[in-house]
Each structure stands twice: as structure tokens, then as C-alpha cells.
Image (cartoon, grey):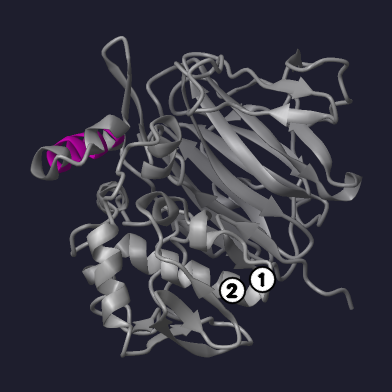
Amino acid sequence: MDRPQIFLYHGAWHIPRSKSSATSSLDITTFPTLSQLPNDMGSTQSLNIALRNGTTSSNVYAYVTGQAINNNYSWFILQADGKTAYYPVSPSSNGSPLAVPCDIPLGPPGSTITITIPQLAGARLWFCVNDKLTFLLNPGPGLVEPSVSNPSDPNFNKTWDFCEFTFNQYQLFANITYVDFVSLPISLSLLNTSGVTQTVTGIPANGLATICSGLQAQSAADREGWDQLIVNNNGSILRALSPNTGIVMNASLFSGYYDSYVQAVWAQYTNTPLTVDTQAQWGALNGTVTNNLLTFPGVGTFTQPSAADIFSCSTGPFAASPNNTAEMGAITARLAAAFNRSTLLMNSKQPDDEVVSTYYQTSPTNHYARIVHAANTDGRGYAFPYDDVGLSGGLDQSGAVSDGSPTLLIVSVGGN
């Protein structure tokens, strides 16, 4: 029996479990019900995804990119008909255009189309409203995806967003994400072969405006530059950047923001142990500060992180350790999550004794994450890379759906 593959979403390890499904063709339909699903669902090689236009625009396009599991993990892009695979070949120069149209029209507001995808790893489902996205190719081939941190990117001033998924022989795992930015409302519903549905509701139609108002209010309260995360185009709000993306564009943003909190954490755990449950084979580990290093004996050490390290969850002490890499990675995920949520001074057992209502209540904290979670109608969605960390069996924060026997993934954009 094959061992399950393990794949990474925003730094959090997920283990796929079972089977997947479905075939169809691209057509505009009413919103599907269980009785309307195709009779041929059950294939482990393909999956149907219903895309619903919940915006007020008739000019909305979708795109699917990923690595084709059954084609040597080569780059895959779904063509405009919603069912034909496009495997780009290596171009002769950087910034070459795609060879075929890959803009999938969603139709008028309220309509739904059905697309079919093969097994994909590290996949993204993109949406663009009132325009089309530009994807480019570099030699390799390498896919140049739209960027919100590069003002020269041809997509920079367009209204777009994406959700993420992996679909393989074990399961479908999908999530909405705000790790890089917030723009369009996206919701997920995953139906399995037993008729059970999992749902992530996302932000409402006015969610971006609500988030930007929250960032402006927080900036007025602490003068830490949260309003600088708001990106406008000709007076209209395009998106709200995460602190990590904001720092990529302005390295001085939030400089020193977490310093006092980090120093207090280091002082508290100089004589008192910090217990981190890896929630894996290494169990719970105790660490204390020795010679200004948070030390987990026999495993590794952490220097004091900066605000940029905390918001990115992947730099400074949170970069991949060359020693005991997986074990240190498990500790890193839980430390980084606790720093973003500012719970280390109130909870010495991470994440076992965490309480969601205490997240983001101590200053300084990741107010972007606080505001984004509050704007989501079910409070869920990745607001930073390790936002799926939580106590075992606790309330999911990450906005993910997964199932070993999926029949249909329904993705709605627009919030209406």
C-alpha cells in the first residue's frame, strides 16, 4: 500500500487520505444541487469544480494553475473551455505569453459554470473582475504569476484574488487565503459522496471595505502604519495587503513593532519553561531562554524574532533549520502562530491551552489578522502562514475544507 504524500500549505503540514472524483464540460447553469450532479462522478483522476459568479459584473474570468501530479508535476494551466489541459513548454525568452487562451468566462451575475481538473498539487484558482489576468512564461518553463508586491506587474492595478487547493488520490484539500492580501470575497463548499457538505463562507460583498476601515481605525489608534496596507487605484480600493507583503514593499514598515513583546516573552521564559506540543511524533517539548536563546535541549534554538520575522513566519529564527528540520519546523509553526496572536505571555502551553477568544487581545499583535478574521462571516481564513495551528480538535481558523471522497467543490466569488 502506498504511503500518503505529505504536502505543505502556508507552512502547515497536511496528510492527504483518500479518493477523489468527477468529469464534466464547461457550461453556464443554475446553481447545482445534489440531484443535478453528473452520474459519472467517482473518478480518482478528475474533479468537477462549480464556479459561481456572485459579483455584480458580467465580466469575470477564472484561471486554474498547478502542478500536474500524473504528468511529472509539470506546470498545468486549464484552457478557456474549462476542461482541456495546457502544459506550457519552455520559451526562448523571459516574459513570453501563453500559447493558448486560458481565460475562463463565468457568465452573468448569479450564473454557475462547471470546470474539470486533473490531479494537481500546489494549485490555485484565480478570479479577475472586469479584466483578464496576464500570466507569463520564463525558460524552464517557469510560470510568472500575478503579483501584488510588484507595481510593474501587468496585473497590479486589476481586481483579482485566488484560493488554493491540492487534489490527489487521497483527498481534496482547499482553502481561502489572506496570507498575501485581501481583495475579492471567495467562499467554498465541498460535497462528498455521502452528501455531506463542508463550507467556508469568506468575507461578504463589502468585506474589503470593512477590513480597510478597520485598518484605518487601528492606524489612528496606535500610529503604526496599518493604513499603509491599503492599496488604491484611481480612488477605488483594490486590496488590503498583509503586513508581510507590506514589508516586502516597504522594509521600514512595522520596524521594531514587536520588540517590547518579544523581550517580555524572553524574560518570562528565562526561568519558566515554555511547553510546545509539536502535535506529531516528537510530542510536547520544553524550552527556556539560555544565553538569550530560546533553547529546546537536543533540538535547537531560536534568537529573538523581529516583526518582519513574525509576520512572514519564515525569516530570521523562523527560517528552515538545517538541523532537526522537521522537528524544528513543528516548533516554529506554533511559536510563530502564538507571536502573531500575542498569546505567549498568557499561555505557557502552546497550542494546547489556547483559547480563540484571547487571540489578538494583547498589544502589540497582528491587527491585520484580527480585523480579517472579524470580517469573515464564519471567522475563518488564513490570515498568516501558520493560521491553521490550534489545539488538537479545536476550532479551525484556517478556512479549509478537505475530504477523501469529494464529488464537487463549489467556489463562489463576489460575496453575493
Q: Quadrant of the N terminus?
A: bottom right
Q: Are marks 1 and 2 in contact (CB under 8 Å)?
A: yes
Inspect the image, locate mark 1, and give the three-letter code of the amino acid beneath it. Answer: Thr
Q: Quadrant of the C terminus?
A: top left
Of residues 211 and 386, the one drawn nearer to the viewer in this rendering = 386
- Secondary structure of the residue carrying numbered label 2: helix
Percent across and percent down for residue 31 are 51, 38
Residue 212 magenta:
yes
Tell me if residue 32 can be seen: no
Type of amino acid under label 2: Met
Asked where in the image residue 235 lies, by quadrant, the reply is: top left
Few, some or many residues within 10 Å of mark 1 (<14, 14–19, 20+): few
Q: Quadrant of residue 237?
A: top left
Label 2 sits on residue? 328
The percent coordinates of residue 11 (x first, y second) are: 57, 59
Identify the residue at horizontal 45%, vertical 46% (top origin).
179
Q: Residues within 10 Å of mark 2 (few under 14, many from 20)?
A: many
Looking at the rendered structure, the secondary structure element under dot 1 is helix
Q: Is residue 127 above or below residue 306?
A: above
- For the record, the magenta segment spans 208-218
Magenta includes 185?
no
Q: Residue at x 59, y 40 (%)?
A: 50
In the picture as drawn, the residue positioned furthest to the front comes out as 291
- In the depicted view, which residue is nearer to us: 163 or 331? 331
Q: Which mark is residue 325?
A: 1
Residue at x 53% of width, y 29% of height: 127
- Left/right placement of residue 79 relative to residue 37 reads right
| Figure check: 397 above or below 229 | below
Q: Position of residue 70 (x, y in %)?
A: 88, 49
Main SS of the magenta segment?
helix
Residue 395 is left or right of residue 161, and the answer is: left
How far apart marks 1 and 2 lie (CA) works out to: 5 Å
